[in-house]
Amino acid sequence: MKKYKVEQIRNVGFVGHGASGKTSLAEAILYASGVSDRLGKVGDSSSVMDYDPDEIKRGHSINASIALCEWNKHKINLIDAPGNSNFIADTPSSLRVVDGAVVVVSAADGVQFYTEKVWKWAEDEGLPKIIFINKIDHERANLQAVMDSIKKKFKKSPVLLQIPVGSGEGFTGLVDLVENVYRKYDKSGKGLGESGEAPQDAVEDVEIIRAELVENVAESDDELIEKYLETGELSNEDFNSGLKKGVLNGELIPVVCGSATLNMGVDVLLDAIVEYLPSPVDRPQVKGKSTQDDSEVVVKSDEAAPLSALVFKTVADPYAGKLTLFRVFSGTLKGDSSVFNSTQNVAERVGQVFGLQGKKQVPVGEISAGDIGAVAKLKTTTTGDSLCAQEHPVVFAPISFPHPVMARAMVPKTRADEEKISTALHRLAEEDPTLKIERDPQTHDLLVSGMGQVHLDVVIECMKRRFGVEVDLHPPKVPYRETLRGRTKVQGKYKKQTGGRGQYGDTWLEISPLPKGEGFVFENKIVGGAIPKTYIPAVEKGVMEAMAQGVLAGYPMVDVKVSLYDGSYHDVDSSEMAFKIAGSMGFKKGVMDCKPILLEPIMEMEVNVPSEYVGDVMGDLNSKRGKVMGIEAGEADQSVKALIPMAEVLNYSVDLTAMTGGRGAFAMEFSGYQDVPDHIAQKVIETAKAAKKHE
């Protein structure tokens, strides 16, 4: 593979809402630049970018896919990030390693919810952006409405670099406002527009919009505005340098139009990427921390500098094994070498390094500063890890991933599946940082959490196809607790006489409640040797075992104090087992006189939605026994904060999507326990007893 100077590299993330056409655009770029010999289509085997069987089956991207091409003597590494909220793990990680973003917006649908989300992520990373308005050939295409929505949603002034000639089926080409030429396309998909004169009926619009474009560029720079006010025009050199400067500092957002599926306007976009998006050396220098003294390290984008790189994705390739994708910030990572993982403080052996064309791995000798590559079979390295030269250890800030929003209990279908399930989940979690696996210590459920029902469905299909593991998913059990509100004194006596040595243990217990969060306290008040010291731990153990299976519905008891204040023993028949049973019997008998109640876990929830949905969300939270704690207003949306029972929000991801058309997001974490209302507690108790009886 040809070697490029760092100034000739463009690392670009393609982001936007699902079905806006990001993958089709990437396919068109690969075809227009000569990488592919045909125009790949999403949903079939011709696609270079969507090659996973689940992607082909569902007709949309599930994973970020990487490819590279050459355009005007520049190398473009393009990362096609998923646009579905169920599969967003790869989007924030992709944006960490690119230098610019192409935000794809449908001309028919405008700026949608997920477009706003990824725009914010790109802003957080300080990425210069180009907007590609796709589907100009769609019958509902409305360029002006889309431009208006961009201004409103992003609070930015987009600048059109071209205007389309015709719309819908009548879309024939673009007038390039930069070069002031008309590019006409045939609809065969070849992708290269032929230059010519603009149609006469478009001349007036061209003059007006070009004047606005030049004015916007001039206003982004003090020197240029002076020239513009003096002459009323800018030279091509001044215009291009001013536009690039405005793009780099985020003041100007260039807009390109076209149709990805017809390969129209794609060549113009490629020109804009090379001309206006930054190379790695145009971006602010990356900063990390030294692992030796925690001091700040500034990393220079220079292949002669010490190596530093960030791993942004892990792929469990069925043939190559684990594939690690990384961006080199400085230095050079060579094949058949060793590298230091500063995150995990371990050295790794590097074999062959690759460039990527979708699923195809292209062997290369090295990956230098500013470039993106992959290596197979690293033993311990995972997503988010930093790689560097051992003599110059540097670690980069970890990648921030969205938190899972839906949890389900996973149950293997057979004993054979049970043995393989752990390996399969571990491999998938390596690939997908938004997939969380844990064992609930109380319910013993194997909990698998993801970004939504579709996400978990794909996990199940993946486990079956790639690892031969079949499982079922069920709503998780709510980890209720039991406690008490009253106190009592009770005798627990165990006496059993059979032939030979018997069993004897006699205890007197005082049972009382503790303040919330105190857990369990056992107090030994025995005086005068009523019970020998050797038997007292056995009484405590018996009480604790009884507490683990509460008296109302079998849930663990909390915030209880038990005092052992009297009892008796037998010189021959007493034993630790007898006193353990006596303690358990006494607790079970006495706790029913202590007004036992059921407690439920309460979640602290933050729901972020566009302003028009706030009323619906608050009404829904109230209907779910939630308590709204406050509302914070943002520029275009609002955050509703509430405390709500876990039992009411096990399917909240589905509910919120239905309520907001997919434009809402939420996060929640455990807050504490509260009393369950009597009428609901009764249902929980009855259900638990029925389940126990069924067992």
Image (cartoon, rainbow, N blue to C red):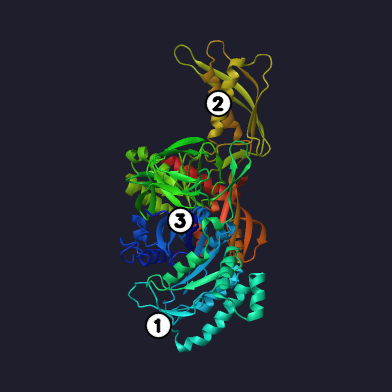
Q: Mark 3 falls on what kind of element?
A: helix
The residue pinned by badge 3 equals 87
Q: Secondary structure at mark 1?
A: helix
Q: Are marks 2 and 3 in contact (CB under 8 Å)?
A: no
Element on which disc 2 rests: helix
Q: CA distance from mark 1 to mark 3?
A: 35 Å
User: Residue 466: where, in percent of width, then height?
Assistant: 33, 47
Q: Quadrant of the C terminus?
A: top left
Q: Is residue 537 left or right of residue 689?
A: right
Residue type pointed to by label 3: Phe
Res. 149 visible in picture = no
Residue 542, label in figure: 2
Give me the disc on residue 170.
Answer: 1
N-terminal of the pair, mark 2 or mark 3, is 3
The kind of residue on which mark 1 rests is Gly
Looking at the image, is 468 positioned above or below residue 218?
above
Give me the residue at 37% from left, 39% from top. Answer: 418
Q: Amino acid at mark 2?
A: Gly
> Residue 478 placed where, x, y %?
52, 46
Between discs 1 and 2, the one toward the N terminus: 1
Residue 134 sits in which quadrant?
bottom left
